[in-house]
Image (cartoon, rainbow, N blue to C red):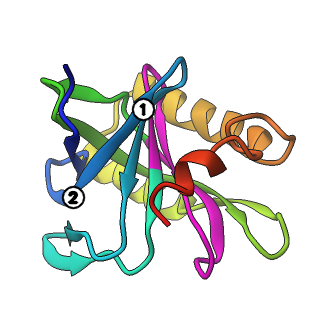
Amino acid sequence: MPSDVVRVIYRKYDGSAHRDYPARRLTEDDLGVWLGVPFGTESVYHGRPSVEKIPFVLLVPHHAWWTCMFNPPPRTSEVYCDIATPARWESDDTVHLIDLDLDVVRRRATGLVELLDEDEFAEHRARFGYPQDVVVEAEAAAQWLYGALGDGTEPFASSYRKWLALVV
């Protein structure tokens, strides 16, 4: 039986710390593993202690080059997707991801979908030597998410709300 608590560990391509936090396993379905992060969760962000001020739900897909945070108000991003290497599970209670800088976001107030951090992606691509296959997968994932966040594709349209309601 899978653990109720999952440690989520994001690193950058060079191995440096990015994010690290515990999350509650909500469910697993054909899309991936849904994790809830309630208000007050202690975390580490860029190597520094932090506390989550706004709860969220994280979808860790089974085999995709992204993860996605679904956020309640007052966070301005309703949906925030990190382009990352496919999840590597260490047993059922720890998941490792490599953040590849690019983010795709849908703004709550306007529904505007944005691709963020292309400059950081280009800088890290050169500095860390991203292999060409990693670049291709990252860019393809960002392009797919850009369309999916704007065209009503689930779970990005509304089906995530049932999981978000469990942590708000």
Which quadrant of the figure contains the N terminus? top left
Query: Which residue is at 73% across, 68% downward?
Result: 107
**Tag of residue 21:** 2
Residue lying at 52% horizontally and 63% vertically, measured from the top left: 119
Residue 11 percent across, percent down from the top left: 22, 50
Pinpoint residue 99: horizontal percent, then vertical percent.
Answer: 35, 48
Characterize the local packing of mark 2: few (<14), some (14-19) or many (20 or more) Cα atoms within 10 angstroms. Answer: some
Residue type at the position of mark 1:
Thr
The residue closer to the viewer here, 95 or 23, is 23
Locate residue 106 relative to residue 130 in the image: left or right: right
The image quarter containing residue 20 is: bottom left
Q: CA distance from mark 1 to mark 2?
A: 18 Å
In the picture of the structure, the residue carrying the numbered disc 1 is: 27
What label does residue 117 carry, if any?
Answer: none
Q: Magenta residues, as a range?
A: 58-83
Tell me the chief SS of the magenta region. Answer: strand
